Image (tube, grey):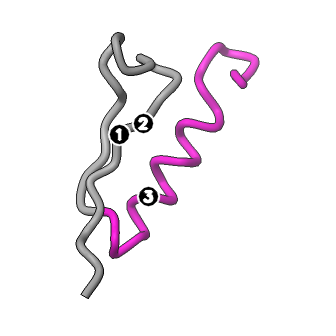
Amino acid sequence: HRSSNGEPVLKKKLFRWLQLRADILAYCEAAPKDGGSGATILLMSAKS
């Protein structure tokens, strides 16, 4: 979904939420071959 000015709404909310998670070490937008702007790649900490 996009806002009235064309900005992605859900992606911004997702990225804000991921920043709060201690088990998410890093994240980024996927490469085009992996889904592009419609996908997010996560690096999660190992379960201890």
* 41 shown above or below 18: above
Foreground residue, 3 or 27?
27
Q: Which residues are drawn in magenta?
A: 1-24
Q: Quadrant of the N terminus?
A: top right
Crowd rating for badge 2 (residues with CA inside 10 Å; few <14, some 14–19, many 20+): some
Tell me which residue sits at (29%, 80%) in the image: 47
Foreground mark, 1 or 3, reads: 1
Residue for point 35% across, 39% down? 41
Identify the residue position indicated by label 1 in the image: 41
Earlier sequence position, callout 3 versus callout 2: 3
- Residue 28 vertical position relative to residue 43 in the rendered view, above or below: above
Above-or-below relation of 48 to 37: below
Q: Give how far apart the Cα atoms at labels 1 and 3 are.
A: 11 Å
From the viewer's side, name the closer residue of 7 and 11: 11
Identity of the residue furthest to the front in this view: 47
Amino acid, disc 2: Thr
> What residue is disc 3 on?
18
- Please state which of residues 2 and 5 is positioned toward the viewer in this rendering: 2
Q: Position of residue 42 (x, y in %)?
A: 34, 48
At 34% from the left and 72% from the top, the residue drawn is 23
The reply, left or right, for residue 10 in relation to residue 17 is right
In the picture, the quarter occupied by the C terminus is bottom left
Q: Which residue is mark 2?
A: 40
Report x, y in % for residue 35: 44, 19
Q: Secondary structure at mark 3?
A: helix
Of the image marks 1 and 3, the number of the one nearer the N terminus: 3
Q: Secondary structure at mark 1?
A: strand
